[in-house]
Structures are given as C-alpha cells and as structure tokens.
Amino acid sequence: MRTVFVSHNDLGLACLEELDRLGADIRAVLTRPELDRISDQTDFAAFTEERDVPLHRVESLNTDEWVDRLAGYDPELLFVVGWSRLVERRIIDVPSVAAFGMHPAPLPRGRGRAPIAWSLIKGLDETALTMFHLVEEADAGDIAGQVTIPIDKRDDAASLYEKVVDAGRTLVREVYPQVDAGEVPRTPQDDDAATWWPRRRPEHGLIDWTHPPEEVYDWIRGQSHPYPGAFTFLDGRRVTVWAANPPSGDRAFVEPGELVYREGDVLGVGAWEGVVELTRVEIDGQEMPAGALVTDQGFAIGDRFAHAATVTG
C-alpha cells in the first residue's frame, strides 16, 4: 500500500523497516532536522538512500505546503510515530485509508507525554504499545492494535525502550496485513477509563532522598539513558545518577542522602528507612562507577547529597 512515514526515533525506524519487509510502497519519509537534539533521535538517511525514497526534514507538518506535498504522494496510509507534535485534521485526512500513530502506553491509560519514564517511575510491572487511528486530540483515536510489554525490576529506560521497539515490529506485522487485505481494525477507546501523564523536562529529574528506596530507584531508572537523567547535588556539584541496583528491602537507620558505604564500584546512599545502591553516575561531564565519587572525586563516606527541599526551597 502507498505509505508516507513520519518519525524521528528508533521505534519509527523499526516500524518502517517492518513495513518495507511486508511490501509496503514507501512513497516518502519525513523526519526532524538533524540539529533538533532530541534525546531519542535517530537518522533515517541510510534507509531512504538504500531504497531511493525521498527524505524530508521538517519542523512541522501543519502547513499548507505539507498538506499539498503529502497529497502529491497519494498515500493510502500515513504513519506518524514518535513525533511528539499533534497533527491537524487536514493532515490526518490526506491518506485515503488510514492515518496511524503509536504510543507506548496501554491506552486509554497513559495518554500524554513521557510514557516510558512514567511507567518506570510509577513502578508498573507491565505497559503496552498501542497503534491507534490519529485524531486531533492526543492519543485518543480508535485502537488498531495493542501489544502488552512486561517490565522487569531491572529494566531501565533504555531496556524498556528496546522492548517497545520490538513491540512496534510485532504490531506492524499484526496490523498491516489486515489493512492490506481491506480490513482496517478499529476499537473505540473508553474515554471514561482514560488517564493523562504529564510532560517531563530535564529539570524535573531532581532526586528526593527522603522517599523510600523503591521510589528513589524507580525515579533513577525511569530517567536513565537516553533521557537526561535523575540528578542530585553533593557539596554544590551536580551529580547525575544513571543506574542503581534494585533495593533489597532491608531497613536501615540512615540520614536521607548520606553516603553510607562503598563496596567496589557501588555507593550506598541513604533514603527513607533504607539504602539505595548507586552503580553509575556522572559529574563534571564524566560518567563513572558510583564508587569513584569517594575514591577519585574527593568525597567521603558520611557526606550527604542535598535534599530536594534544600535545593528547591
């Protein structure tokens, strides 16, 4: 089927590759400018050059120019995956069969922003990737397909994103043959069951060490690579925490934020009635094992990370 694909991330590239394998007629690919510096941005040039498909770098689809240019490709299908910008009805109406989006949440739950981060921050044990029909409201269109994704306690943003990418391939393999056969799946969402997850910005990653260890751990892993990272301050120096061990559940009499012990590369830090073991951190632009804060950076056991209230208040 004649297809135009819009995306800037690895999920989109995986779905595009799967469509190509299934025989879709890829008429054009639209992606973001190279200098957008989006955390999960990937390049589509290799795919389009190998297949001699036009590649366009655009800031927005919602212009008279792109309504006309998309219509010129005469698409039956339009995919907008990982775009993070709403598209207007005049774009959605361009394809003759369907316009699809994807969202890594079990819609109708989890409409909105940062679904991978929120799934981990909230300690969920599963999420989903949903393919849906585009409407002007975010993530609210009829569902075309959904794949459940289990979340392991050791998953972080990077490993969960890999699972989302795999789920994208699965969804395309399930849905595209149906559409190609003339059967377009469509199940209305239950708006009464919908929830909304808000946008996250880099400055939202400040760690509050007065929370229980499980919450601090989920906070860290939900914002790890490729996202900006959870962060804290030690003697006025910003420390980004990239990885930690799942908490043991043991209680400990410690001060929140206190550097309690170092065991090799691991640094134990006090939280509410327990300890979080940090494994990877970054300071002054250099990523390193967490234990290096004590062995190489001049800090000592007994020093304390600042509380969130201290930093913000």
Image (cartoon, rainbow, N blue to C red):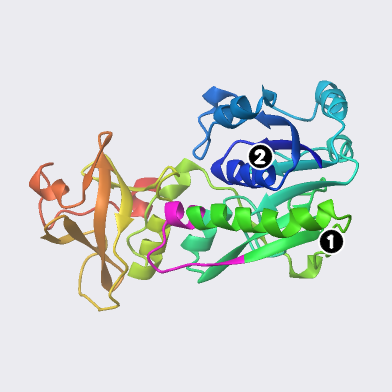
Name the residue carrying label 2.
Answer: 83
Q: Please tell me whether residue 135 belongs to the stretch shown in magenta.
A: no
Question: Which residue extends farthest bottom?
Answer: 250
> Is 94 left or right of 308, judged from the image as shown?
right
Which badge, 1 or 2, comes first in the chain's sequence?
2
The residue carrying pointer 1 sits among few (fewer than 14), some (14 to 19) or many (20 or more) residues within 10 Å by Cα, namely: some
Residue 42's x, y, as percent? 53, 35
> Closer to the camera, 3 or 6?
3
Q: Amino acid at mark 2?
A: Trp
Disc 2 secondary structure class: loop
Rendering coords of residue 154 (x, y %): 37, 65
Say which quadrant the N terminus sits in.
top right
Tell me, yes or no, whether the two marked residues, 1 and 2, touch with CB atoms within 8 Å: no
Res. 290 mark: none
Q: Is residue 313 above or below residue 285?
A: below
Question: Magenta residues, as a range?
Answer: 148-161
Q: Which quadrant of the view contains residue 87?
A: top right
